[in-house]
Image: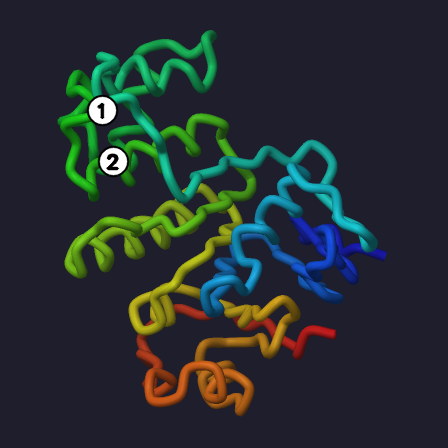
Amino acid sequence: MTDISTLLAAREINLIMGNNRLLENVSFAIEEEEIVTIIGPNGAGKTTLLRVVLELLRPTSGSIYHRPGMSIGYMPQRLQLDATFPLSVKRFLSFADKGLKTGALGDALEQTGAIHVFDSAMQHLSGGELQRVLLARALLRKPHLLVLDEPVQGVDVHGQVELYQLIGRIRSEQGCGVLMVSHDLHLVMAATDRVLCLNRHICCSGTPAMVTSDPEYQKLYGHLALYQHDQNHHLHNKSCSHAR
């Protein structure tokens, strides 16, 4: 039986394409107001898992639970834009929902600190500005769950810290859950409540401190596994068990 606070649950997910086993017995759940981050090496199946939980890919076996009536805001890893096609930020955001008024678009940009680019061309945005616009687009759905695929991609280190802090504020202010994928190890560890270390299967899971001390994590990352958790970072007082 699924707890009423559970937003999403993956149960024994397996995905086989051709002769390739992309995901193996993956199980986890996301609760209200929880930030969960999926890490893992290239080819580990991180983006594939997001596509499965978004029900864009059907697993070979296993099941996905979404809380009834839940709204999901999705931020993709990449955005392909035709450099010759004139597209303003305002127009891009309006594509998310034709019924949205200009004020709602501006409010979303205000939330992400990008209101200054409202009338700018998408092609002229910096890496950080583009990511904030994509996050604003995800927020237009008033999501109960934000799904973010590499939300700090193409952003410098200072900008990455600011974006992770922004995601934390949005979680607190809107009370939404967050599921994100990241290649980063050190910065994201201070910005998440729970970590899933994926390498087709879940190698280990738990709080950042638990995961970074796990032999499976250290086997994958070696010297990069050295991480000291910031004790001032907010963590939910929830127990995190090893994924089965």
Q: Is residue 94 above or below residue 23?
A: above
Amino acid type at mark 1 = Met
Q: Are marks 2 and 1 in contact (CB under 8 Å)?
A: yes
In the orientation shown, which residue stands out farthest toward the right?
Answer: 1
Is 58 situated above or below 199?
A: above
- Dot 2 or dot 1, earlier in sequence: 1
Q: Nearer the viewer, residue 40 or 98?
A: 40
Q: Residue at x 63, y 71 (%)?
A: 202
Disc marking residue 143? none
Q: In screen coordinates, is 198 left or right of 98?
A: right
Q: Residue at x 39, y 51 (%)?
A: 150
Q: Is residue 192 left or right of residue 106?
A: right
In the picture, the quarter occupied by the N terminus is: bottom right
Q: Which residue is mark 1?
A: 122
Residue underneath mark 2: 130
Decide: is 190 above or below 210: above
Q: Nearer the viewer, residue 128 or 223?
A: 223
Residue 176 percent location from the top left of the image: 51, 45
Expressed as whole percent of the image width and height from the top left, the position of residue 129 reads 20, 37
The secondary structure type at the circle numbered 2 is helix
Q: State the residue in front, 179 or 48.
A: 48
Residue drawn at the location 36% of the way across and 71% of the way down:
185
Amino acid type of the residue tagged 2 in the rendering: Leu
Residue at image coords 31%, 79%: 230
In the image, residue 123 lies at what x, y percent? 19, 26
* Quadrant of the rendered image containing residue 204: bottom right
Query: On the rendered structure, is 165 left or right of 64?
Result: left
Q: Residue furthest front?
A: 19
Q: What quarter of the picture does the C terminus occupy? A: bottom right
Given residues 27 and 71, the one toward you in this image is 27
